[in-house]
Image: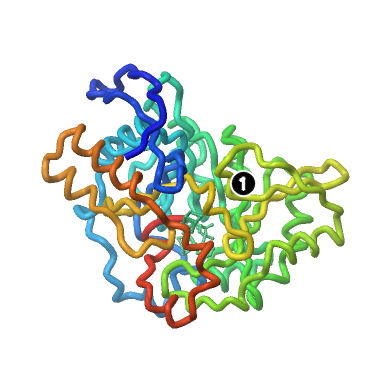
Amino acid sequence: MRITPSHGTGAGTAGALRLPSVGLLDARDRPLRDLRISVTDRCNFRCVYCMPRAVFGRDYAFLDRDELLSFDEIEHLSRIAVDHGVRKLRLTGGEPLLRRGIEELISRLSALRTPDGDRVEIALTTNGSALAVKAQALKDAGLDRLTVSVDTLDDELFQRMNDVRFPVSRVLEGIGAARAAGIGPIKINMVVKRGLNDGEIEAMAARFKDTPYTLRFIEYMDVGTSNGWELDEVVSAAEIVERIGALFPLEPVGARATGETAKRWRYADGSGEIGIISSVTNTFCGTCNRARISTEGRLFTCLFATEGHDLRALLRGGASDHELSAAMAGIWAARDDRYSEIRADLTPELRAARQRIEMSYIGG
Ligand code: SAM
Ligand code: SF4
Ligand code: SF4
């Protein structure tokens, strides 16, 4: 296992043992910086590209409550991950605001400190349906960053895409409530699927231009197997930039930090910027510093991994902090994932044969 120099030993949190800190590097020299934690596999939406009703219907077997990681377990694993170099914790799902007491989890995570005594950034990705009610409590609990998914402003299309007839106005109201509560920065994520909502690119850009919100376009990905992904449904980053640029001239902006997923573009007239996450046409595996913990405590080192490492079994089997820490370090050290870079070399048959996990299980 290769390690970068120690940051020293940090002060304890919540009376727990702190281990000497190390910065891990994986087999491709990538550090571990960003941990995404799925707090529920359930969702009140049935987005057609993520949890299509035909698969996630009435009979779908979601996890039982005792299968989910508890808040104690999530806090425990997060503390160890922070000791290993994680600087951002993102809560996701399913729909994370459906997890009862999510504010308590946020407040516990925001009390974690890096070995240097710094706060860790706490972020959340949500469909926004419960934001109007929860925004203030999330802010009070210590939420730093928020990403809200909005795939169109056209209410009829929005309701068709979430497939539960949820109106877009209530999501926009939730975004306003989050801003009023002082949560920021707030980003808006739009997944673009050709033939479904690609006609909305320009309207979304116009709506969020010159606002406090940064709009990010996400290329539709072949996550999981439920959505029946086809390459020709992907609208490329280049096309998105060209279409928006034809209306509002854009200039590229350099990356702020390594591992940044979105390529940034600024409006030439100074009215803000957009981001494009081009996981299909312009991959960024080379700097990928993200790990994911599924709802039931499996650690995945890639969004497209076929298998996770069962940390819940270790936690519930009474593993010591040292053992958990060593397990996490060993998993990261062995990490060699770069699925998006090799996607183009896979035949449709080979891709179909890979048992990829669902986005709603592992989180975005
Ligand atoms: N329910 C929350 C939400 O929708 O924001 C959090 C979980 S959701 C799985 C996280 C993000 O993944 C959302 O922005 C969603 O649009 C995105 N997503 C889901 N399926 C996707 C796909 N096939 N390709 C690209 N993004 C996807
Ligand atoms: Fe739910 Fe988010 Fe997936 Fe839509 S994208 S079905 S809101 S988890
Ligand atoms: Fe990271 Fe895997 Fe996505 Fe590449 S494909 S950027 S390694 S999560």
- Position above or below: 247 against 354: above
How many numbered markers are drawn? 1
Give the residue number, with chain letter if any, for mark 1. Answer: 187
Q: Would residue 164 be found to the left or right of residue 82 on screen?
A: right
Q: Would residue 49 be found to the left or right of residue 359 on screen?
A: right
Q: Position of residue 186 (x, y in %)?
A: 61, 42
Residue at 74% of width from left, 46% of height from top? Answer: 273
Corner quadrant of residue 114: top left
Q: Secondary structure at mark 1?
A: strand
User: Three-letter amino acid code at disc 1?
Assistant: Lys
* In the foreground, 220 or 261: 261
* In the foreground, 62 or 116: 116
Q: Would residue 38 be found to the left or right of residue 193 on screen?
A: left
Q: Position of residue 56 (x, y in %)?
A: 37, 73
- Position above or below: 129 against 7: below
* In the foreground, 132 or 80: 80
Q: Is residue 107 visible?
A: no
- Position above or below: 200 against 69: below
What residue occupies the far bottom of the structure in this picture? 349
The N terminus lies in which quarter of the figure? top left
What residue occupies the far left of the structure in this picture? 317
